[in-house]
């Protein structure tokens, strides 16, 4: 298990530029997948918005990924689900109490 926490130096290429990173060995696949997703999104925006500057393309890419991230956070937000369960539990308890009184 100790080998999984060793640092690893990798080079991530985003939009033609190389970025050296020191990461945990166990995270390598995640970093490479993230870079791949960024590059695919950059390519999509380059094809859609021909002639735009790299800064604009990268800004739109960052924005798209941020939107996707917020959607995932909303889907994974279990606090809303827990609140609904608590409300439902309270309603059932109230109903049973009323039923016992009758």
Image (spheres, helix red, strand yellow):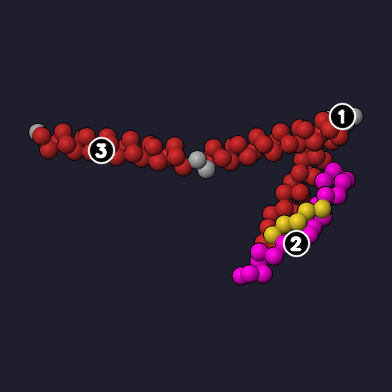
Element carrying mark 3: helix
Q: Is residue 17 above or below residue 57?
A: below
Determine which quarter of the picture holds residue 6.
bottom right
Q: Which quadrant: the N terminus?
A: bottom right
Which quadrant, please, contains the C terminus? top left
On the picture, is 101 further left or further right than 86? left
Q: Quadrant of residue 26?
A: bottom right
**Within 10 Å of the Cα at label 2, are there few (<14), some (14-19), or many (20+) other Cα atoms?**
some
Residue count near mark 1 (Cα–Cα under 10 Å), binned few <14, some 14–19, many ≥20: few
Mark 1: secondary structure: loop
Q: Which mark is residue 64?
A: none
Quote the CA–CA distance across marks 3 and 2. Answer: 54 Å
Q: Earlier in the sequence, mark 2 or mark 1?
A: 2
Q: Is residue 9 rendered to the left or right of residue 80? A: right
Return the disc, 1 or 3, that comes first in the chain's sequence.
1
Residue assigned mark 1: 52
- According to the image, label 3 marks what residue? 92
96 in relation to 49, above or below: below
Question: Residue 11: within the magenta?
Answer: yes
Q: Residue furthest left?
A: 102
Residue at 17% x, 36% y is: 97
The answer to whether 25 is drawn above or below residue 93 in the figure is below
Disc 3, disc 2: CB below 8 Å?
no
Measured as percent of width and height from the top left, residue 21 is found at: 78, 53
Count every numbered label the image shows and give the total: 3
Residue under circle 2? 8
């Amino acid at each position: 298990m100790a080998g999984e926490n060793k640092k690893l130096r990798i080079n991530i290429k985003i939009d033609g530029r190389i970025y050296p990173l020191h990461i945990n060995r166990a995270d390598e696949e995640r970093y490479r997948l993230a870079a791949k997703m960024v590059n695919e999104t950059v390519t999509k925006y380059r094809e859609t918005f021909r002639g735009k500057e790299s800064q604009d393309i990268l800004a739109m890419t960052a924005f798209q990924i941020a939107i996707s991230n917020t959607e995932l956070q909303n889907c994974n937000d279990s606090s809303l689900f827990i609140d609904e369960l608590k409300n439902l539990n309270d309603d059932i308890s109230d109903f049973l109490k009323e039923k016992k009184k009758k």
